[in-house]
Amino acid sequence: MENLIGLGILAALLVIGYFFGRRSELKHYKKIRQQEEKLAYMPVVIGQWKNELDPQQSYELVHGSVVVGSDYFKTFASSIRQIFGGNIASFETLIDRGRREAINRMKLQARALGATKVINMRLETSSIGSNQKGKQGLPSVEVHAYATAVYPPELIS
């Protein structure tokens, strides 16, 4: 009987985790899309900028970072998937949301400088809290975007 109660509690927690996690994820995606629409005018060049630097422009390092955490349902689902191997689709949204949010934050910093474009963008990721001192925690991903903002020199404050 105790085993059935334990399984019922686990199932209830998974269902609650799924619905609240999904709601939070959809809300975050909506916010990201709104930011992307506001910043769509600013191009971001990912590859190495091969053109000569324009002496009529100013350049400054800009960056944005974010830490996106997983919910219990995704962590549970990924644990099951790791038994059999293969792609862990439940974590792909963590990386996607983190990447897009970090780029938006970097572009917001560039916009504050009056930048017209962002060149030589790079992304770095790291895992946080997935396995600290033998304790399994909720995995989180940190994404850091950095680049060079290009803006007219008269905007220097």
Image: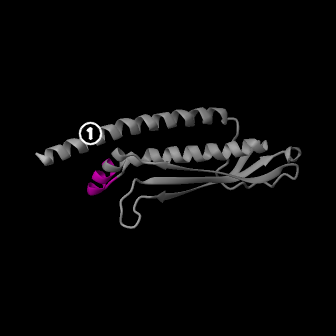
x, y percentage for residue 91?
Answer: 41, 48
Front-most of 152 and 45?
152
x, y percentage for residue 80?
Answer: 27, 52
Q: Main secondary structure of the magenta part?
A: helix
Which residue lies at the image location 51% right of the left edge and 37% below the top edge? Answer: 28
The question of residue 79 being in magenta is answered with: yes
Q: Which residue is mark 1?
A: 12
Left or right? Give the position of 11 relative to 90: left
Report helix, strand or loop for mark 1: helix
Q: Residue furthest left?
A: 1
Residue 15 seen: yes
Q: Residue furthest bottom?
A: 133
Residue 44 seen: no
Q: Residue furthest front?
A: 2
Which residue lies at the image location 31% right of the left edge and 49% below the top edge? Answer: 76
Q: Is residue 128 above or below residue 66?
A: below
**Boundaries of the magenta span:** 77-86
Left or right? Give the position of 134 relative to 33: left
* Residue 107 falls in image quadrant: top right
For badge 1, the amino acid type reads: Ala
Front-most of 19 and 91?
19
Which residue lies at the image location 17% right of the left edge and 43% below the top edge? Answer: 5
Which residue lies at the image location 74% right of the left edge and 49% below the top edge? Answer: 149
x, y percentage for residue 130?
Answer: 41, 58
Count of residue discs: 1
x, y percentage for residue 143?
Answer: 55, 53
